[in-house]
Image: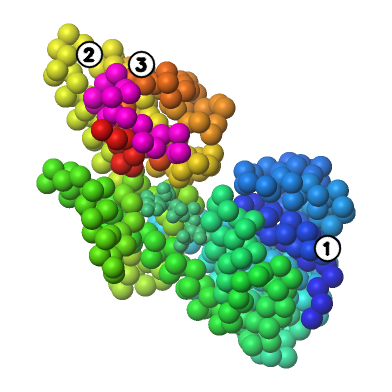
């Protein structure tokens, strides 16, 4: 199959790099997004998200004329839907973005087109997407009714790239390709082979959906194990970092690292898609979510204990006299992405309860986010080392690794990442 024109719907953290990589292989790419500001920026060769080297690839793709963005879908040979799939208040998946994207591309579909759902989705979402498309286009046939003979081919190919390494992982990672029929899978493989150097492995749509959820749930459960260990070790007065280092010397043990909680918009979300489908069966997966979600509040409690201990040792002071410093705001090391960050959550909570100064050190940003700018001050590391009475290390950015405890003017340090050395 040849794909002359490819449309990517949703130009966010996955859609934009994917569009740019297709364009870099000299394919005509039409990017579609509901955000006019993002569309305008991309058409100027600029980007609205942070991802290493993406600015260059997009700039080249736009200036060479291979990539163009628009808010209204246009005909293409293949459509990739990469829109958000958040959950609602009750942890039920919210498929409304997929529904809107399906209804938007429906009118421009033609016989022979391929539609791929890339968004991380609960099991059954691809079939649901196909049903929405069929509703829009009763004149065309779809795999759920026509099987291999359908006019439109439908597949789920979940993205699995690590933020911060998206351009490399898009090309190098293996790809799970779940077509609604074999012909759909084969069409999707020939599309991805335009740039994927990893293997394209064929399965069904439902297995592909579950595979993505399984990968992120596996990581969530393993991080929850590390987080629970850190809480147990605190109680037993054992250094959890040393414990994990020792246990990991066993040839079949590989424990992940505890932290202040699990951030980002994938690992903390996707396990709920399994829980919501099989609530009576997904007990371990649900428990892991609860352990990880409770970790930020545990850190806040540790800070409260440190404050009480400081005040006991310094009876002439009150909490208003104390300066607290949070090191790190991002959801993981060495990026500037603050979305769904446990460090942000903890900083907000501290800003609400601490009556004194709250300093933030985040080497990857130049300005505090609006929600913190009135209650916190952005400082550099040196200044926090000199001023803070209580230090809370929240992200293991490279600038913080191996800092000596003695470099702070205070011994009251809550290190949620185990990077401060004695
Ligand atoms: N974290 C820990 N301890 C660890 C590892 C991670 O506390 O040992 C925390 C991080 O600090 C962060 C959160 O977990 O707050 C998630 O970070 P991450 O690096 O584990 O994952 P993400 O969210 O950046 O990307 C994940 C990846 N999935 C897996 O590794 C299985 C990526 O491949 C997926 O494409 C991505 O989710 C996604 O889009 O679903």
Quadrant for residue 300, please give it. top left
Which residue is labeled 1 in the image?
Answer: 26
Crowding at mark 3 (Cα within 10 Å: few <14, some 14-19, many 20+):
some
Crowding at mark 1 (Cα within 10 Å: few <14, some 14-19, many 20+):
some
Q: Nearer the viewer, residue 298 or 142?
A: 298
Circle on res. 387: 3
The structure residue drawn at horizontal position 72% and vertical position 78%, both measured from the top left corner, is 190
| Dot 1 and dot 3 residues touching (CB under 8 Å) | no
Confirm whether the magenta stretch covers residue 403: yes
Chief SS of the magenta region: loop
Residue 71, image x, y percentages: 77, 52
Circle on res. 318: 2
The structure residue drawn at horizontal position 79% and vertical position 63%, both measured from the top left corner, is 25
Q: Nearer the viewer, mark 2 or mark 3?
A: 3
Q: Secondary structure at mark 2?
A: loop
The structure residue drawn at horizontal position 18% and vertical position 18%, both measured from the top left corner, is 311
Quadrant for residue 406, please give it. top left
Residue 308, image x, y percentages: 18, 24
Q: Is residue 46 above or below residue 283?
A: above
The structure residue drawn at horizontal position 23% and vertical position 24%, both measured from the top left corner, is 411
Range shown magenta: 397-413
Which of the marked residues, 2 or 3, is nearer the chain's N terminus?
A: 2
Q: Secondary structure at mark 1?
A: loop
Q: Nearer the viewer, mark 1 or mark 2?
A: 1
Mark 3 beta carbon near ligand 1 (under 8 Å):
no
Judge left or right: residue 289 versus residue 78. Answer: left
């Amino acid at each position: 199959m040849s794909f002359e024109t490819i449309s990517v719907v949703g130009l966010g953290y996955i859609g934009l790099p994917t569009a740019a990589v297709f364009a870099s292989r000299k394919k005509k790419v039409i990017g579609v997004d509901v955000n006019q500001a993002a569309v305008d920026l991309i058409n100027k060769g600029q980007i609205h998200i942070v991802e290493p080297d993406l600015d260059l690839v997009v700039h080249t793709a736009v200036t060479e004329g291979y990539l163009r963005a628009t808010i209204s879908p246009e005909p293409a040979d293949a459509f990739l839907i990469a829109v958000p799939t958040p959950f609602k208040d009750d942890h039920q998946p919210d498929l409304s973005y997929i529904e809107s994207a399906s209804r938007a591309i429906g009118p421009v579909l033609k016989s022979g087109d391929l539609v791929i759902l890339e968004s991380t989705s609960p099991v059954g979402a691809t079939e649901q997407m196909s049903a929405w498309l069929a509703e829009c286009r009763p004149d065309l046939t779809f795999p759920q009714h026509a099987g291999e003979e359908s006019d439109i081919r439908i597949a789920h190919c979940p993205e699995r790239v690590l933020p911060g390494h998206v351009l490399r992982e898009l090309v190098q990672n293996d790809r799970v390709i779940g077509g609604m029929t074999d012909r759909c899978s084969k069409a999707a493989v020939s599309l991805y082979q335009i740039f994927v150097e990893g293997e394209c492995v064929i399965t069904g749509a439902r297995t592909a959906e579950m595979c993505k959820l399984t990968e992120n749930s596996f990581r969530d459960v393993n991080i929850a194990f590390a987080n629970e260990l850190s809480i147990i070790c605190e109680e037993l007065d054992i250094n959890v970092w040393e414990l994990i280092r020792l246990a990991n010397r066993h040839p079949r043990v590989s424990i992940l690292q505890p932290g202040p909680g699990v951030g980002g918009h994938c690992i903390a979300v996707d396990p709920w898609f399994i829980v919501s489908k099989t609530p009576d069966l997904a007990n371990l997966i649900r428990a892991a979510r609860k352990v990880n979600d409770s970790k930020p509040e545990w850190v806040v409690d540790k800070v409260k204990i440190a404050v009480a201990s400081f005040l006991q040792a310094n009876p002439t002071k009150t909490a208003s006299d104390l300066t607290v410093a949070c090191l790190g705001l991002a959801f993981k090391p060495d990026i500037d992405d603050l979305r769904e960050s446990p460090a942000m959550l903890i900083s907000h909570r501290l800003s609400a309860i601490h009556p004194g100064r709250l300093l933030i050190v985040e080497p990857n940003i130049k300005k505090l986010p609006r929600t913190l700018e009135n209650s916190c001050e952005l400082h550099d590391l040196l200044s926090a080392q000199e001023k803070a009475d209580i230090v809370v290390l929240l992200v293991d950015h490279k600038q913080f690794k191996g800092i000596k405890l003695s470099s702070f003017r205070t011994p009251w340090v809550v290190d949620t990442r185990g990077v401060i050395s004695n």
